[in-house]
Image (cartoon, helix red, strand yellow):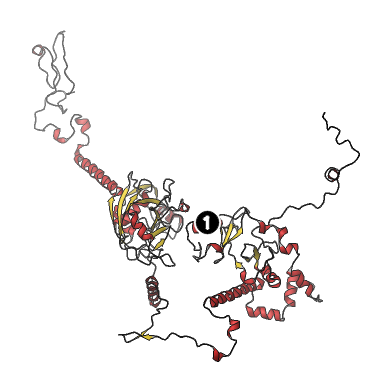
Amino acid sequence: MGKKQHSKDRLYLTTKEWKEEWGGNRGPREVPFTKLPFYCCAITFTPFEDPVCSPDGCVFDIVHAMPYIRKFHRHPVSGEPLEVRDLIQLKFHKNSDGEYHCPVMNKVFTEHTHIVAIKSSGNVYCYEAVNELNVKARNWKDLLSDEVFTRKDIIHIQDPLNFQNKIVNEFEHVKKQLSVGDAQQADETPQDSVFRTVTDDTRRVLETLGTPASKSAFDSGGGGKAAEAIRSLAAEKSKKEVAAQRKSEGKKPDEQQGKGDWRLRAPKRERVPTFKPGANTWDTDDYANPEDESKKKRKKNRQETETSTEPKAFDANGAKANPKEAYEKHVKYETAMETTGGMSRSFTSTIMNPQTVNSRVLMRVDRNPKKKGYLKMHTNMGDINIELRCDVAPRTCENFIGLCQMGYYDGLVFHRSIKNFMIQGGDPTGTGKGGESIYGPTFKDEIDQRLTHSGKGILSMANSGPHTNGSQFFILYKSAHHLDQKHTVFGKVVGGFDVLVRMEKVETDEEDRPREDITIKSVTVFVDPYAELIEEERQKEEEKQRIESQVLDDDKGLWFTDPGAKTRAELPDANTARPSGVGKYLNLPQDRTIDIEGASDFGKSVDGMPKKVKGKAKQKTVFGNFDNW
């Protein structure tokens, strides 16, 4: 009940009621938008095979993008001006299951993944990898090809929070219904064909034989439309690069170079070698473009390598000794429960040498100290004090201390230094590809959540993938949490941070190699927990041998003949007079007697036994201690 209970008691319907409640005309309905997947071409809406993209991140198939842009010179999605040379060829990567994924983080691409591409290389990654390893680390090099790029070269292929260029209904060629294929079909005149039992593709190929189009395609290299489009894109890009280079050098383009009278052109400047004073040769050094010392050194090494006739095998240790062989004297082995399986293999295979004994496997004994290690690294820029967490990463710390003590790091240079990131060394070859451990070429990771890449001076192992640790290590200039759970942290710098600051200020070349050599002179180990464990094992072994040497071989069986004697030296002499009667063959102590009251009546004890007394005389026996029993 209420005042407005009869407000709708009327004899008519409003427009809104008729439209919403009584089935009237509701007007044009809005169709929900359709989002284009990242793996589909924005022109044909089908999965691409040879992907290219525009500078704004729209992906096309090069076979369909080239004819469209050549005809309309417009962006198929936004409608803005676009040329063929502006397209970027993309390089998507697939995993073993055939799914597109990030080659760095192995993360499978989905509709919710933020996907980016690098303009200079065309490689496609997830945004998380580029943001952590390039943007935050200020490492402006491609993660796969090491090509230099800038922040503007990062192209966003798919952004889950911004999909305005992925709505199919808003595409320019969809709204205006532009299509290259329809125009080509309209221009062509249908011809009668004599082929009846062939497919459309075969008929089209046979009809184009002998035409100028087929001849030009054959001259250009063949390969189909995709290969021809890729070659055209490369040609357009090369023209663009040449024009930009000529513009930067102040030269005119090719089309304007040949104009005008040739007699009015300025002569070309050619560099004439000058005579070097005080020498008998011409001065051919390029003073306009001098090379730094690192480039000259690499060029000289390359020339020596090329002139050498015999190919040299790559030695990971350089001029250093094999660390595994040098450290073998400190290794302890014990026999394991399993066998080598040599007898089983020889029994089941005819190519194996016959074996009749199953030898057991020798297993290396791992030493696990409970304390930390300390050492000092002497460099040409100063000393660095380092603390090693032997209690958390025992295998890694043992490898590092062992290499330091055998002089493996003496004379090596830090071959890589990145400002605001880290400095890397420990490679005898100085190339970043060498170095071995005391366990062999590589050993497994020891990743612990208690040790992370947080703070300046963190010491961690360099690797080329999981379980590929060798001798190379790096020291952080600042935190790098993106390396957690990927590299083994085993220590930190506790003194000499001013030396790290000086190392960071050293200029580097385009390969991040310091222009001024940073050399490790030597390493002094102050606290070695592993040497202490080895000394304890040696003392225990000596004590064990000393105890075993005290026990004579002829002491066996004394527990039966003489329970009180421990050695032969304590046995009674054979020349000593033995008692007669019962028990004369027992080796009893001479002073083993029993005190009996009334010895005058009963007699003195002989051999510990009282004399037998006739009658019922009362014996009072008093015992002292029981030492002689």
Choose between 543 and 486: the one closer to the eye.
Answer: 486
Judge by depth and name the residue closer to the eye, 592 or 255.
255
Percent position (x, y) of residue 224? 66, 73
The amino acid pointed to by label 1 is Asn
Q: Does residue 501 sit above or below 222 in this rendering?
A: above
Q: Is residue 7 above or below residue 317?
A: above
Location of residue 277 by image quarter: bottom left
Can you give x and y, in whole percent of width and height, for residue 470 in the image? 39, 58
Identify residue for label 1: 131
- Residue reaching furthest to the front: 3
In the image, taking residue 142 as reference, residue 185 lies left or right, namely right
Res. 282 in view: yes
Q: How many marks?
A: 1
Q: Is residue 362 visible?
A: no
Image quadrant holding the N terminus, namely top right
**Residue 437 higher or lower than 541, as above or below:** below
The residue shown at (62%, 63%) is 56
Look at 62% across and 69% down and name the residue there: 86
Q: Nearer the viewer, residue 521 or 579?
A: 521
Which of the pair 275/465 is nearer the observer? 275
Secondary structure at numbered mark 1: helix
Residue 75: x %, y % from top left:
68, 66
